Structure formats: C-alpha cells, structure tokens
Image (tube, rainbow, N blue to C red):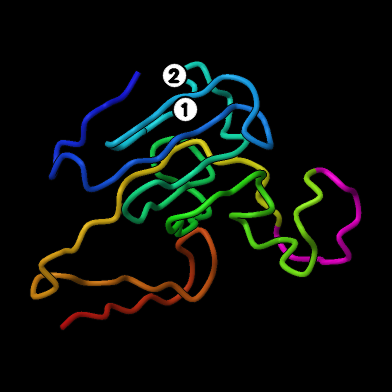
Amino acid sequence: MTHRCRRSSGLWKIVVWDEAFFQGKKHEFTADCCSTPEYGFSTVGSCKIESGAWAGFEHSGFQGQQFVLERGEYPCWEAWSGSNEKKMYPCGEAGSGSNAYHVERMCSFRPIACADHGHSRLMVFEQENFQGRRGELSD
C-alpha cells in the first residue's frame, strides 16, 4: 500500500521494513507517518529513502530523538542513528564502545519540505526535556 503526500505528491517516498536488512513486512509512504504501530510495525527495522528528505523520530507523534534521512539505504538502526559510524552497521552487535545515547527505534517520520523562513523561529533549551533557560532564534 502507498500513501500519497498531502503536500506535493511525488516529491517524497520512503519504503520501510519491520526487520533489519530490508526483511519482513514492507510499507511505502509518501506522506507523514505519525505512528508506525498504526501500520502494524512496532518500529522501523530498515528503510530506503527513494525521494526527498525525511525526518525520522524515536517515538510516535514526531517525538524524541530526531534523524535527518537523505536519499539512500538504511539497513538497520545504526545506519540512521549515527551510533556506529566507523563500522559497517553490524546491526545488533553488542558493545560499540561508545557511551553516546543510542536510539534503537524509529516510530514516526515525515517529509522535510521547504518552509517560509520569514516566519520561522527556533526555541533552544539549556537542558534536555525543555528544562533550564531558553532562547528563541528567528529571522
């Protein structure tokens, strides 16, 4: 099944599988996916970006750690999370040697479209979970 994008149909396409290395259940999207469980996926195991750029998120509802996904193949979570950049994505190998925050799931994603930056603003926070001092950046 393919979902057409509400924005400009045909500009974005992502294919996702529920298992690593493009195995298991497969689904194509050309629009936002707010929650992979709604489509029978507990999480994305692998994906291919066929067109456009996409933002992937750790949790449903476009929440949590965010990943920018450009055209190409992402055979497992290490490929998009950047947690194992120096290795060739062993997918599940224990002990990558890094103490970085590892995100092993992607439960929502949406196409990245150009915005009217004349009305854009960015809120930044001193600490995680929107804590501490905050600042606003805008054009």
What numbered label is drawn on residue 36?
1
- Overall secondary structure of the magenta section: loop
Helix, strand or loop at label 1? It is helix
- Whether residues under marks 2 and 1 lie with C-beta atoms below 8 angstroms apart, the answer is yes
| Mark 2 Cα-neighbour bin, 10 Å: few <14, some 14–19, many ≥20 | few
Is 17 placed left or right of 15 in the picture?
A: right
The image quarter containing residue 101 is bottom right
In reply to whether residue 97 is colored magenta, the answer given is yes
Instruction: Give the image location of residue 26, x and y in percent.
Output: 51, 23
Image point (49%, 21%), residue name: 37
Q: Is residue 29 above or below residue 94?
A: above
Image point (28%, 72%), residue name: 122
Q: Is residue 39 above or below residue 113?
A: above
| Mark 1 Cα-neighbour bin, 10 Å: few <14, some 14–19, many ≥20 | many
In the picture, which quadrant includes the C terminus?
Answer: bottom left
Instruction: Give the image location of residue 14, x and y in percent.
Output: 40, 40
- Residue holding disc 2: 39
The amino acid pointed to by label 2 is Tyr
What numbered label is drawn on residue 122?
none
Image point (71%, 55%), residue name: 102
Instruction: Give the image location of residue 71, x and y in percent.
Output: 43, 56
Is 81 placed left or right of 57 in the picture?
A: right
The amino acid pointed to by label 1 is Thr
Helix, strand or loop at label 2? It is helix
Image point (27%, 26%), residue name: 3
The image quarter containing residue 1 is top left
**CA separation, marks 2 and 1?**
5 Å
Is 54 placed left or right of 97 in the picture?
A: left
Per the rendered image, the range of residues in magenta is: 92-101
In reply to whether residue 7 is colored magenta, the answer given is no
In depth, the one of 58 and 16 nearer the eye is 16
